[in-house]
Image (cartoon, helix red, strand yellow):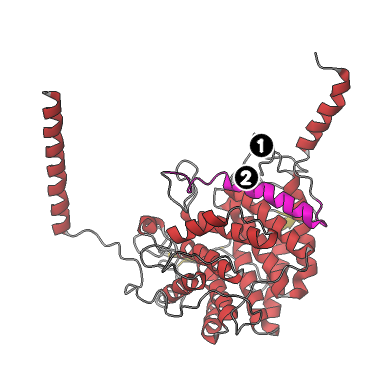
Amino acid sequence: MVSIWRIPLVLGCLIQIAHGIDLDVESTDSLKSAAKTIAHGMVSFYKGNETGQTPGLLPYPPDGYYWWQAGAMFGALISYWFNTGDTAYNAITSQAILFQVGDDIDFMPLNQTTSLGNDDQSFWAMTALSAAEYNFPSPDTPGAPSWLGLAQAVFNEQIQRWDSAKCNGGLRWQAVPTNKGFNYKNTISNGCLFNIAARLARYTNDQMYADWAVKIWNWIEAVGFVDSNYRVYDGSDADTYNCTNIDHNQWSYNNGILLNGAATMFNYTKGDPVWEHRTAGLLSSAKQIFFVDGGIMREGCENPPAIPCNQDQKSFKAYLARWMTVTSQLAPFTRPNITALLKTSAKAAAAQCNGGPSKSACGIQWDKNGTWDGTEGVGQSMSALETIIGALVTTDLKVPPPFTGSTGINPGGTSVSVPKAGKNRTATYVDTSVISTADKGGAWFMTILILFVGSVSIWFMCSM
């Protein structure tokens, strides 16, 4: 029988659980503690550092995590390390990035080509670029690539894929012609290249990258993926409609990728009013569309009658939060607005991180007064983590903005520049051509031979 004197204690525990993570958004200690709890939960879904598993991959199947989201997760862990000082996940992060660079050191591993999009390759490149910008420890393996060089390799390859034959330019979604979606040109693929170009310009102080950033932005705007009110749309079919039939769905990460790129160009150009206007316009649009109930971040797929968010979409808020955070540093005029939005969202996100066996699992819906929505996963955790890190950065003004190389605007970055990285690829797109008749014949012969040898072996063992 439970003593009546213990009832208040039990009720107190229940109330604490129901309240999720108690977050004081004005306290750096509280923000770091919350980030640590959520980072631990996020990494619990990762098995790539275990014996027999593949470094850099999240479970698929059964959980349905695509390759790009793993790259994004390690980007979050780099940001977590830089802003909290916690090195707990540095080793698995470095291991994962280096394992996924592929034979050509360009984030195109052969086992991913059947679903490889330009945006997928770019998310890994942006993680490497973050490693350069934050001085993430360089690998001590002899001959290992530099973080900056990895991003430069992807940039050099993707500008060769710029396709002027359809829609007067732009990247296609997919990097492999036989992949479903090769006909589609979208904001995220082009936005990623714009983002990488802008950040490389700022880091290296090389105008060539800036010129490409301007070219990509101009195309995105001209084709109508960004309208005059800075609403950002998903993309369009290039082959059938020549990008005239635009998908007007709006996703937070499409806005965020352009916002961060525009803020980077504002910073690189030392305050160009054109980039100031674009940065302000994108932030205003993001606030109107993705923040509700007094400033809580929400994705359009979270509530009925929308189709429920898929595994990818559950992570989109993470990227908007990440890129808003950096925007607040590179374009200081945005800081007051972004600070208010991220702190409100961080508090709401932490409040509902009370689910699962751990009683700290995070869902995707933050506007339910601290009620966990019953979902958990990498995307949900990453979204909460990046938002809380954003609140931390806007609270702790001593946190420096991303570094640049010695000739850039914020010297301190030490990653080695490799301007010609990635230029050894001869094909514009990955060659996944059909196996030749001779190859098929050889493969068929080997198959028959293996089956014959196997059958004889089984007969021999059974007859003993």
Residue 162 appears in the rendering: no
Which amino acid is tagged 2? Gly
Question: What is the crowding at mark 2: few (fewer than 14 residues within 10 Å), some, or many (at least 20)?
Answer: many
Query: Can you identify the residue that label 1 sits on?
Result: 358
Say which amino acid is labelled 1: Ser
Residue stretch in magenta: 24-51
Q: Is residue 3 left or right of residue 106?
A: right
- The answer to if 154 sits in the magenta stretch is no
Q: Earlier in the sequence, mark 2 or mark 1?
A: 2
The image quarter in which residue 107 lies: bottom left
Magenta region includes residue 40: yes
Q: Which quadrant: the N terminus?
A: top right
Q: Position of residue 24 (x, y in %)?
A: 82, 52
Q: Quadrant of the C terminus?
A: top left
- Residues at discs 2 and 1 in contact (Cβ within 8 Å): yes
* Residue picked out by circle 2: 41
Name the residue at the right extreme. 5
In this rendering, position of residue 127 left or right of residue 364: left
Q: Can residue 39 be seen in this view?
A: yes
From the top left corner, tell me how far across and down residue 329 is, in percent: 71, 71
Q: Is mark 2 on a helix, strand or loop?
A: helix
| Label 1: how many Cα within 10 Å (few below 14, some 14–19, many 20+) | few
Q: Which residue is drawn at 30% across and 65% down?
A: 431
